[in-house]
Image (spheres, grey):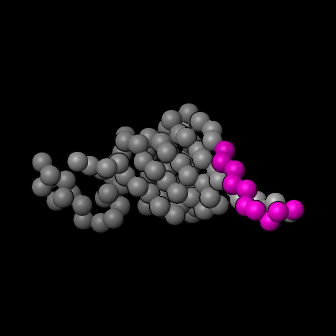
Amino acid sequence: MADEAEATVQEPMDLIKLALDERVYVKLKGERELRGRLHAYDQHLNMILGDVEETVTSVDIDEETFEEIVRTTKRMLPYLFLRGDGVILVSPPLRT
């Protein structure tokens, strides 16, 4: 069965095809990260994700102490249409 999976990977986009209906990790521009179930995608990496957990990380500088203050905000979304021009990385689930 592993031979079948390897035989179907001809191009990098084939790895994303194998992740359909599975949870994926998506890193976006602007310190945003998404984890959700991949329902659909296209050649531009536009994606439809379901059961999405969005994490936004922001770093501020305290004006008095000049220390970095890291803030993390999380929210859950039932569905999300993601435009592909903001995608930096798509990580399919680990296969054992």
Q: Is residue 53 above or below residue 30?
A: above
Residue depicted at 76% across the width and 62% down the height:
67
Q: Is residue 49 magenta?
A: no
Residue depicted at 37% across the width and 52% down the height:
92
Single out the residue that lies furthest toward the front: 65
* Most foreground residue, 54 or 49: 54
Q: Is residue 67 left or right of residue 95?
A: right
Residue 17 locus on image (x, y percent)? 33, 52
* Most foreground residue, 77 or 64: 64
Q: Is residue 3 above or below residue 36?
A: below
Among the 4 quarters of the image, the one containing residue 31: bottom right
Can residue 39 be seen in this snapshot? no
Among the 4 quarters of the image, the one containing residue 6: bottom left
Can residue 23 be seen in this snapshot? yes
Magenta residues, as a range? 64-73
Q: Is residue 72 magenta?
A: yes
Single out the residue that lies furthest toward the right: 64
Residue 7 locus on image (x, y percent)? 16, 59
Residue 9 locus on image (x, y percent)? 24, 61
Instruction: Name the magenta segment's main secondary structure.
Output: strand
Q: Is residue 13 above or below residue 49?
A: below
User: How many callouts does the rendering have?
Assistant: 0
Residue 19 locus on image (x, y percent)? 34, 48
Residue depicted at 26% across the width and 49% down the height:
95
Residue depicted at 23% across the width and 48% down the height:
96
